[in-house]
Amino acid sequence: MVPGGRRALHDPRWPALNQALVDLRLRHRHAIRIVDADCAAGSLLLRACRRARELGFTAIEGRGIDGSPALIGQARAAALKLSDPAIGVAFELADAQTALRDEADFPADIALWSGAHRPAIDDALARAAAFVICDPACSGQGA
C-alpha cells in the first residue's frame, strides 16, 4: 500500500489542501511545512507530502500529531515506506492544542484539523500556519 493513498483523496479537506499546495508552488515556493494536528493514521499528511513532491517542492516537512498511540504507530509505520530524501515526516503522540501553541514561534505553511472547533483550538490553528484547512463537516467552515 502506498503511504497516503486513496483514503486521503476521499478526505473532505483534500480539494482545499491540494489547491493550497498548487497555489504555494505557483508562487515559486520550493520548501513547504505541513502540520496535521489531528492526523489519525497519517494518510492525509503523507498524501500531501507526496503531492507536494509531485508539484516540484524540493524540501517537504510534515508533522503529524494525534492523541492515540495506536494511530501514531500506524502513521509511523506508513511513513517508513516513504523513500524520498526530499520528504521528512514525523508523527508524535501529543495534545493538539499544546502542539499547535508550540508551532506559533515558527508557523507552518499549512495546518490541517478535522476535530471539533473550540475557541482555544481555533486560535492555536490561526497562529500555527498561514493556511488552515478544516473538515467542513465539523463546523460548517472550510479552508
Image: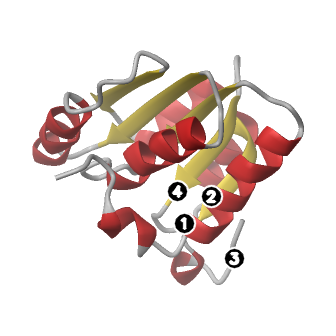
Going by the numbered disc 1, the residue's amino acid type is: Trp
Q: Which circle marks residue 141 in the picture?
A: 3
- Is residue 9 placed above or below 58 in the rendered structure? below
Q: Where is residue 79 in the image (x, y as percent from the top left)?
A: 26, 33
Q: Which of marks 2 and 4 is nearer the N terminus?
A: 2
Q: Which circle marks residue 113 in the picture?
A: 4
What's the residue at 22%, 41% (across, down)?
75
To which residue does mark 2 refer?
17
Q: Position of residue 101 (x, y in %)?
A: 60, 30
Element carrying mark 1: helix
In front of the other: label 2 or label 4?
A: 2
Gap between marks 3 and 1 measured at Cα: 14 Å
Q: Quadrant of the C terminus?
A: bottom right
Q: In which quarter of the image is residue 133?
A: bottom right
Labels 2 & 1 near each other (Cβ < 8 A): yes
Element carrying mark 2: helix
Q: Which of the two residues, 36 or 116, is positioned nearer the viewer here?
A: 36
Gap between marks 2 and 4 measured at Cα: 11 Å
To which residue does mark 1 refer?
14
Labels 1 & 4 near each other (Cβ < 8 A): no
- Is residue 27 placed above or below 102 in the rendered structure? below
